[in-house]
Image (tube, helix red, strand yellow):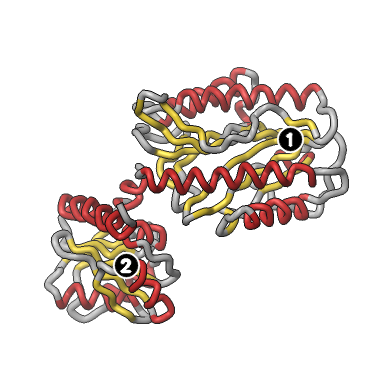
Amino acid sequence: MVMPQIHAARRERAQEKIAELGPDAALITSPANVRYLTGLVSSNAALLLPAAEPGVLATDSRYEEAARRDCPDLELVTERFIEPALARLAAARGLATVAFEAQEMTVERHADLAALDDGPALVPLGRMVEELRMVKDETEIALLARACAITDEAFSAALRDIVPGRTEREFAVLLERAMIDLGAEAPAFDTIVASGPNGAIPHHVPADRPFAAGDLITIDCGARSGGYHADMTRTVALGEPAAWQRDIYELVATAQRAGVEAAMVGADVSDVDAAARDLIEAEGYGGNFRHGLGHGIGLEVHEAPTIGYARTGTLVDRVPVTIEPGIYLPGRGGVRIEDTLVVRDDAAGSRQILTRTVRELLVL
């Protein structure tokens, strides 16, 4: 199936949901959701999607040619102020009630639409498109797998640059450069490099701290390819690790394996989280693992579902997620291990692990 047909099929599924919800149309404004439903990559685009009529794509002149190329089956409106243009068009076509993406639209933009003379009534849509995006088709999974393969290869190539005196910031730049050289569009997110005591900060921003013998170094990285994001974390040791470092590494590795094994079709997300978290808590480190176990991933690096102790939901076939337990000891350091995988319901097994870098402690 070629991409315009894939996007048309996605719009049909979205239209079925819109019809179930009751509004006459939905105004899709999240850039990731617009891309998912149309194929257009733009910083200024929106889609008016009626429940029972073809959609209308709006963008400005900067993206007009790209829209004509990538979305040949959609009616196109070229305007600078796309949302009012589509709201006026909805009213003119008798679409009296339009659902909007409240999670993305600002109060100011909503007020502008609500103030239009004879404009449509506005109602919240909810995260309808995000829910559709949670289950990936095989084209999406192939793009995600490519992003993960680039990440693995770049990480392997950059390992030689983990040497005493190299700074966190320098290594982050080298790793991101390797991703680009291997074909990534861009890094999936700002690379995290946390060495020594900085490893106790889960989302540490790489700084000018030089690597030193005895450090544990946590590297959270990913490539973006075809719009899809990889996410992988490995913790390595520079020089022979101390006993406490090996101990927490082995505990996190055991917890991560348990989380991966629990991530299967039909599993409750809170149970997947507990499979890893309970092991860490049982060893007395529960207070040192305070973030969720993982998240969905795709056109955005953080998508539904969230795998956490206070979350609800059930994993289904073809949902990519991350599994990323960690232990963080203030003033000393930390360990996190993370993989991207796809939950599968087939004879081959219950999951497809996309990030392949070894999970054993690498001593450099």
Q: Is residue 33 left or right of residue 199?
A: left
How many numbered marks does the figure carry?
2
**Residue 125 in sight from this viewpoint:** no
Q: Which residue is mark 2?
A: 71
Check disc 2 and report its element: helix, strand or loop.
loop
Determine the CA span between mark 2 and mark 1: 45 Å
Q: Amino acid at mark 2?
A: Cys
| Residue visible at 38% across and 47% down in the picture | 139
Q: Which residue is mark 1?
A: 236
Q: Amino acid at mark 1?
A: Val
- Label located before the other in sequence (2 or 1): 2
Residue 340 or residue 7, whichever sits in front: 7
Q: Residue furthest top?
A: 282
Q: Nearer the viewer, mark 2 or mark 1?
A: 2
| Residue visible at 14% across and 69% down in the picture | 96
Q: Is residue 283 left or right of residue 25?
A: right
